[in-house]
Amino acid sequence: MNLELSRPEFDLLRQVLERHISNLRMEIAGTEKYDWRKDMQADEERLKDVLARLDEAGSDSNRDEDLVILVRGVVLVEG
């Protein structure tokens, strides 16, 4: 499956992920249940990894180009 994003859509996706990660940190800090905390910490790490790969893909491309994200597991390619 290919997911084509315009540059504004790509930037919005990055912003949403950054906000969610920030909110997730607050939830982790306020969670008393050990299992939930561990699950949320694992989610945070996965989201940070996705965000890092989005940043890498975005910095490797021209700011005026749209991006194509190939979703097969989690694989990013520049189009």
Image (cartoon, grey):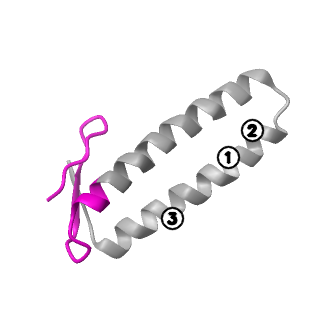
Task: Write the start and end of the magenta stretch as one range.
Answer: 57-79
Question: Where in the figure is residue 20, as x and y percent of width and height?
Answer: 60, 54
Residue sitting farthest toward the top = 35
Q: Is residue 44 left or right of residue 47?
A: right
Residue type for callout 2: Ile
Residue 8 belongs to magenta span: no
Q: Nearer the viewer, residue 3 or 49?
A: 49
Nearest to N terminus: mark 2 or mark 3: 3
Residue highlighted by disc 3: 15
Q: Is residue 32 above or below residue 57?
A: above
Residue at 37% x, 55% y: name it: 55
Quarter of the image for residue 13 reads bottom left
Say what amino acid the circle numbered 1 marks: Leu
Q: Is residue 74 left or right of residue 37?
A: left
Please report the residue visible at 18 percent of the width from the left and 55 percent of the height from the top.
78
Q: Position of residue 38 (x, y in %)?
A: 67, 25
* Residue under pointer 1: 24
* Labelled pair 1, 2 in contact (Cβ < 8 Å): yes
As rendered, which of 62 and 15 lies closer to the eye?
62
Element type where label 3 sits in the image: helix
Label 2, residues with CA under 10 Å away: few <14, some 14-19, many ≥20: some
Q: Where does residue 15 sit, x and y in percent of width and height? A: 51, 64
Q: Left or right: where does residue 51 sit relative to residue 34?
A: left
Sequence order check, earlier mark of 3 and 1: 3
Please, what is the three-letter code of the amino acid marked with disc 3? Gln
Q: Which residue is mark 2?
A: 28
Q: Position of residue 58 (x, y in %)?
A: 30, 61
Q: Which mark is residue 35?
A: none
Q: CA distance from mark 3 to mark 1?
A: 14 Å
